[in-house]
């Protein structure tokens, strides 16, 4: 199993997970042409995908999903709340698969284990991907951790973990107070220290890859995010990967 990122941040998010001939895209927050261009960087064409999973209806995760699915005939998997929250015409789409955020399902060679998260969306869900032997956990866009999140992510072989902001940078920055309160709140985004605390609660003994994701361009730096996670792992900050807004990251193999 391997995975790669098209980009991660407030201007768009998309991740691809592959097992043999099954490839799923998690979120599609970029316009149609930009999504196609970023897939090509990974030597993928839209027809190589089995479909799109959507975590929630915020534009940086869903903006291009329906148009991309419509053009390329791809099914989508999302919760009922996310489907209802999309502010557009969904009448002319390929199959919509409504999922329960507590119920596993399979697409080809990949097993999907969804789990709900505290975020200011209608019915957000994130995912653990598995091929039966290896597990990739992905968690972005959550304002706080829960015991269920920690149980789902514990024992993963790879983890993409939100490190949205440095709390001091956010609170001393130029955002209006209402936005600071929203971002730092229980239903907002994880700051570096909270992400490190979540990581410390996990069984990380199997981790081959740890990626800091969804970094704020205004209120965080890769150095701060990597340092926070590295302190928990007892590793050099350079071992921690970063999902970049413009470049994402290339293929990473889980062995």
Image (cartoon, helix red, strand yellow):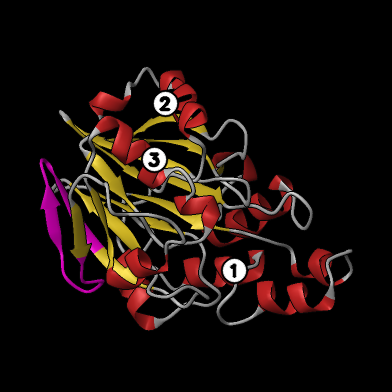
The residue at 70%/61% (across/down) is 165
Q: Depth check: 106 or 252 in front? A: 106
Asked whether the viewer can see residue 255, the reply is no
Query: Which label is found at residue 190?
Result: 1
Q: Earlier in the sequence, mark 1 or mark 2?
A: 2
Compared with 52, 59 (above or below) is: below
Q: CA distance from mark 1 to mark 2?
A: 28 Å
| Residue 135 highlighted magenta (yes or no) | no
Q: State left or right for residue 44 relative to residue 60.
A: left
Q: CA distance from mark 2 to mark 3?
A: 15 Å
Query: Which label is found at residue 67?
Result: 3
Compared with 146, 53 (above or below) is: above
The magenta stretch is 99-113
Mark 3 or mark 1: which is in front? 3
* Pointer 1 local density, CA inside 10 Å: few below 14, some 14–19, many at least 20: many
Residue underneath mark 2: 39
| Quarter of the image where one finds residue 231 | bottom right
Q: Secondary structure at mark 2?
A: helix
* Pointer 2 local density, CA inside 10 Å: few below 14, some 14–19, many at least 20: many
């Amino acid at each position: 199993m391997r995975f790669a990122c098209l980009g991660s941040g407030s201007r768009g998010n998309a991740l691809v997970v592959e097992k043999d001939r099954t490839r799923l895209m998690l979120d599609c927050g970029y316009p149609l042409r930009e999504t196609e261009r970023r897939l090509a960087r990974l030597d993928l064409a839209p027809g190589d995908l089995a479909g799109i999973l959507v975590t929630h209806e915020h534009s940086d995760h869903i903006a291009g999903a329906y148009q991309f699915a419509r053009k390329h005939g791809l099914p989508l998997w999302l919760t009922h709340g996310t489907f209802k929250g999309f502010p557009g015409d969904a009448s002319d789409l390929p199959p919509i698969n409504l999922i329960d955020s507590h119920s596993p399902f399979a697409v080809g060679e990949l097993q999907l284990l969804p789990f709900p998260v505290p975020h200011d969306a209608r019915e957000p869900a994130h995912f653990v991907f598995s091929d039966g032997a290896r597990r990739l956990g992905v968690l972005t866009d959550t304002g706080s951790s829960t015991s269920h999140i920690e149980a789902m992510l514990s024992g993963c072989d790879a983890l993409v973990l939100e490190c949205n902001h440095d709390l001091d940078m956010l609170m001393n920055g130029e955002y209006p107070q209402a936005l600071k309160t929203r971002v730092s709140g229980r239903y907002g985004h994880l700051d570096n220290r909270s992400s490190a605390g979540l990581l410390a609660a996990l069984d990380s003994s199997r981790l081959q890859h740890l990626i800091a994701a969804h970094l704020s361009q205004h209120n965080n730096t890769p150095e701060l995010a990597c340092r926070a996670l590295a302190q928990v792992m007892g590793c050099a900050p350079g071992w921690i990967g970063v999902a970049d807004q413009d470049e994402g990251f290339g293929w990473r193999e889980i062995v």
